[in-house]
Image (cartoon, grey):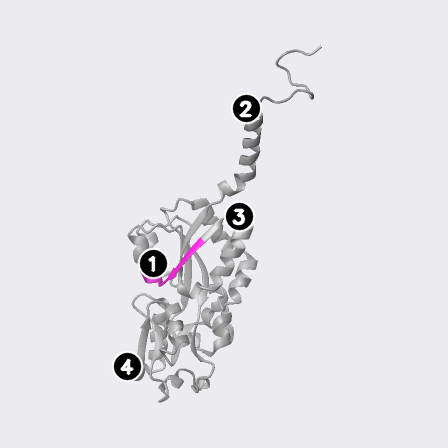
Amino acid sequence: MQRRGLWHPGRRFPQLGRVAIIAMIFLIALAPAVRAEELTVAAAADLTFALKDVAASFERQSGNRVRISYGSSGNFFSQISNGAPFDVFFSADVKYPDKLAGAGLVEPGTLYEYASGRIVIWVPARSPIELGRGLDALLAPEVHKIAIANPEHAPYGRAAVAALRHQGIYDRVAGKLVMGEDISQTAQFVQSGNADAGIIALSLALAPAMKERGRYAMIPPDDYPPIVQAAVVIRSSKHKRLARSFIEFMKEPETVAMMRQYGFIQPGAAQSAAASAK
């Protein structure tokens, strides 16, 4: 005997019930996509290639998206100070995150010194400039324009000026200097032929596109103040948990190794290497 209102294998679902079940299955299938978040990152231009690889790896692991804007650290500092909606700030100079922290604009305990940057002289592959002479190569008569990042808001530009002064040639080449808005634009000046040589970030010189088109020479780290780079989570972020996860991801051995491929080493390791060299 069959009682009313009870389901049995031979009885069909009412039409409304079938629709509800299909909708539920559809929502369950879409759940991961619905939960996915998008992290908005402001990053120093020297990270253009390295952070792209790191972000792709983080996206695969977390299932979330990372949207990165590149530019000068000083400009991003001003934008964030004025309320720009970034979740994470990767600066080429730890001083900018420190200043933001002092203004109460950073999530406490999130500052991480992720790398120590280095600068190089870069010239196009067919350039006659002899890089073996180091910075003195910039005094050659065939060098008419030298690209550096604007030292007013780009840490790599300040490092370039410091190195030129340390070598005692700044006054002799000052008239040849052309300023890029950030270190990425500086590299483009040399690539495009608008400058004969440039002082750029090692991370850009090691990128495949730059590596194939030119050659570089390291500038001794003792010639300029350390370029200690740091990242922080912005206090106004709406994705603080994900932002903290991204900072932690930067500390993982695989990520550190990925950054090292672009010439970035952790500040502590850089100091140890310098001490060993002496």
Q: Which mark's residue is nearer the viewer, 2 or 1?
A: 2
- Counting residues from the start of the chain, the first of labels 4 and 3 encountered is 3
Q: Which mark's residue is nearer the viewer, 4 or 2?
A: 2
Q: Which mark's residue is nearer the viewer, 4 or 3?
A: 3
Point 55% across, 52% down: residue: 60
Disc 3 from disc 2: Cα separation: 34 Å
- Counting residues from the start of the chain, the first of labels 4 and 2 encountered is 2
User: Which residue occupies the extreme right position in the image?
Assistant: 1
Residue at numbered disc 4: 175
In this view of the protein, can residue 162 be seen by the observer?
no
**Quadrant in the rendering for residue 170:** bottom left
Q: Is residue 145 above or below residue 33?
A: below
| Residue 245 vs residue 16, the one in the foreground | 16
Q: Is residue 235 above or below residue 167?
A: above
Residue at numbered disc 2: 16
Disc 2 from disc 1: Cα separation: 54 Å
Magenta span includes 252: no
Q: Dot 4: what SS?
A: helix
Going by the image, does 61 lie left or right of 70? right
- Dot 4 amino acid type: Gly
Whether the residues at callouts 4 and 2 have beta carbons within 8 Å, the answer is no
Going by the image, does 9 lie left or right of 230? right
**Quadrant in the rendering for residue 92:** bottom left
Numbered range of the magenta stretch: 67-76
Coordinates of residue 66 in the picture (x, y in percent): 46, 52
| Residue 28 vs residue 243, the one in the foreground | 28
Q: Dot 1: what SS?
A: helix
Residue at numbered disc 1: 76
Residue at numbered disc 3: 63
Q: Which mark's residue is nearer the viewer, 3 or 2?
A: 2
